[in-house]
Amino acid sequence: MKKILIVSNRLPVMVKKTRDRLQFSASTGGLAVGLQSLEEIPNYFWLGWPGISTDQLTPPDQEEIERRLHAEKCSPVFFTEEEVNEFYHNFCNKTLWPLFHYFPLYTVYNDKSWSFYQQINRKYCEEVLQHVQPEDMIWIHDYQLMLLPQMLREKLPHHPIGFFLHIPFPNYEIYRLLPWRKELMEGVLGADLIGFHTYDYVRHFLGSVSRLLGLDHYLGEFITKDRVVKVDAYPMGIQYEKYAQASQKKKVQQAIRQIQEKVKDCRIIMSVDRLDYTKGIIERLEAFDWFLTQNPQYRGKVILILVAVPSRAYIDQYQDLKKRVEGLIGKINGTHGNFVWMPVWYLYRSLSFHKLVALYDAADIAWITPLRDGMNLIAKEFIASKKTKGVLILSETAGAASELGEAIVVNANDRDKMAAAIRAALEMPESEQSRRIQSMQERLRRYNITRWAQHFIQDVWDRGRAIEKYTVRKVSAAIQDRILDQYQESRNRLFLLDYDGTLRHYEDNPDQAYPDAELLDLITHLARNPANTLVIISGRDHPTLEQWLGRLNVHLVAEHGAWMKEAGKNWQILEMVNNDWKAMIRPVFELYADRTPGSSLEEKNFSLVWHTRRADPELARIRTQELKAAVSKLTENLEIRIFEGNKILEAKPSSIHKGRTTRLWLARQKWDFIMAAGDDYTDEDMFEALAESAITIKVGHDLSHARYFVDSSRDIRRILHRLTETNHAKHRPVSAPHTGSRTGQYL
């Protein structure tokens, strides 16, 4: 039976050892708490660190931990103390965490810690391989394991893999600061589905992939060298009913009464966070100080209950933050407080569930204003816990702000607006509070944690099925064998091959356009067989093709069919066209080349081509659409076609295309073997002109008229190499001449 294999840095069960005894308790981490409701999803198994290093454990201890955790559907990944320090404390919490939260000045770049990050991701990979079964799905979580998807993909090419990032993904200008930016990105792209909390993070990720790896996306899908990867937003929910019904419990009701007895008639502003510099606690305290200064009428009438959960006390910035927070609280209480009223109540500890939801219930306002936050579930828990009134003040840089639009949304760095938000919340009519609360509650009730998990898991399964459909058409080893059999049994063979992106490797050296020695040798050997007719159909101009390939025993077609040269003969024009249209649209192409750094204009005999391979990808996409619209309008009454290809935009007469040239070669004689290969939009006319029985191969995963596809030009070369190896082999006799369709019935 297939299962969900969850992989995260920490397990939902943590282990401590005191006085030679092991103690097991529920994890307090945000991810583990958020995923507790996975009990409603059948047949899952969880891999992660149990929170204790092997330096503190004996072999019997490790055996007991494994046994106890297995009963909880978990399995431990053990770390040494050095691994915990270098991987978790240093690289995860001193490199990735601050940078992804837009604190580059706090970010430490350390090669040793990076080596440990790689090492721990490999350790996780080994653990997953020990537990995974053929039909399992693997769901990897968070920034600690960004290399793991690709590591697993190399071992499990057909397994469905999902990756979810629970913290913000920064914009490109921040992310590019990482020395290991490409390695991390390639690691994440090993997944079939990549999830984020908000579309802002999706957009940042898509832009960084485009800039760093040169991959363009369509509707959030990347075509990598071997797969299609989907990127999308899945806002994480909470266990809504757990919080909505919590106030009915006796322990919670008792805790609510205790809070009300202590605060008396004061209004409560609640603030609950980990003590982390990303949470905006300093800015919040400064704004509260300013609010009391600007609104003295509220002195003695409002209390800020600030709960700061201890976090990462081993990091200098966290120690400094604690001192600053406590110093500010002392200043505010000393300036504004008196013998009977203290404006800030400070709790430096975590709260039990019943005390936390009691605080949610008793509070009039929840003040949640992180400087950056992946989602922030505290805001959602507060809303779910309320009955008819309550106000949420939420920073616009919290992921939850995109869902909770009825909150008072503020800039966490704007002291005046923060102070104004407190006053607006205190003075908001109960009817308005109720309207806003109910609207947010309905949304949170519908998209709770279970639906979030089920939605993501189902999409991963669906991606797997989509990939299976792709692999049906992918040129497998078995299909290659059948191509080879057909090749050996045929007498009159026609090869129609594109050059750039099909025979030439874009990925090896984008700047080297001329054919390498291997390709020249391959073409020479393939054309040497008298049964083979080899036609290279390219968009290149004819002088260039003559220089590169003119001495070979092959037929050449240039500019997509405008020029042709048969082997050993001179070039001839296949289509006489009027080029007056160029003068009209050339200035427009030149304008966009000037306005788009890195782009260039190429003029051929019968076409104009705008290249954007070296331009900023996002700007190139915008400019391409603008240029396409402008040129299309100018040429709408002309026989000119505008083609958008792989980082190019081309204008050329509609009568010139590869399909026309293909039909000319088909009419030459009856072929009993036809193979055509290409990689972009210009080759679709060629594929469309061929019968279904022809072997048509698209390089890449785009939608195509081709019958098969391969991942890269290397695969085309491998297929052709196999055919050349049989050039001197003895052909099997053909029993009778072919009398069927012009291309025969094969494959």
Image: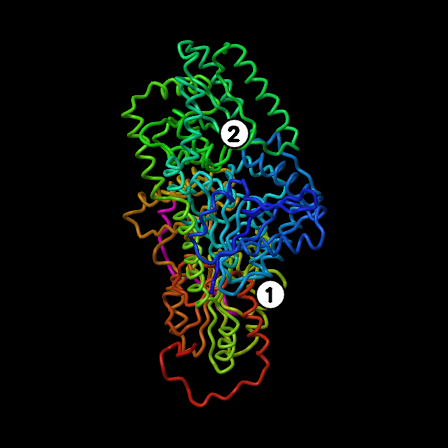
Which secondary structure, mark 2? Answer: helix
Q: Which residues are magenta?
A: 565-582
Considering every residue shown, the one lying at the far bottom of the view is 735
In the rendered image, residue 482, in percent from the top left (x then y), is placed at 49, 77
In the rendered image, residue 213, in percent from the top left (x then y), is placed at 54, 48
Q: Is residue 142 visible?
A: yes
Whether 299 is drawn above or below 5: the answer is above
Magenta segment, principal secondary structure? loop
Q: CA distance from mark 1 to mark 2?
A: 61 Å
Tell me which corner region of the image, top left, top right, bottom left or bottom right, holds residue 735: bottom left
Q: Nearer the viewer, residue 720 or 220?
A: 220
Placement of the C terminus among the 4 image quadrants: bottom left
Q: Which of the two discs, 1 and 2, sits closer to the camera?
A: 2
Mark 1 residue type: Leu
Mark 2 residue type: Lys
In the rendered image, residue 92, in percent from the top left (x then y), is placed at 61, 40
Examine the structure image and report whether residue 572 is included in the region drawn in magenta. Answer: yes
Residue pointed to by mark 2: 279
Q: Is residue 599 visible?
A: no
Tell me which corner region of the image, top left, top right, bottom left or bottom right, holds residue 150: bottom right
Which secondary structure, mark 1? Answer: helix
Q: How is the image coloured?
A: rainbow
Circle 2 residues within 10 Å: few <14, some 14–19, many ≥20: many
Whether 248 is drawn above or below 514: the answer is above
Q: Residue at x 31, y 30 (%)?
A: 388
In the rendered image, residue 17, in percent from the top left (x then y), is placed at 66, 44
Whether 512 is drawn above or below 596: the answer is below
Q: Identify the disc placed on residue 408.
A: none
Q: How many marks?
A: 2
Residue pointed to by mark 1: 520
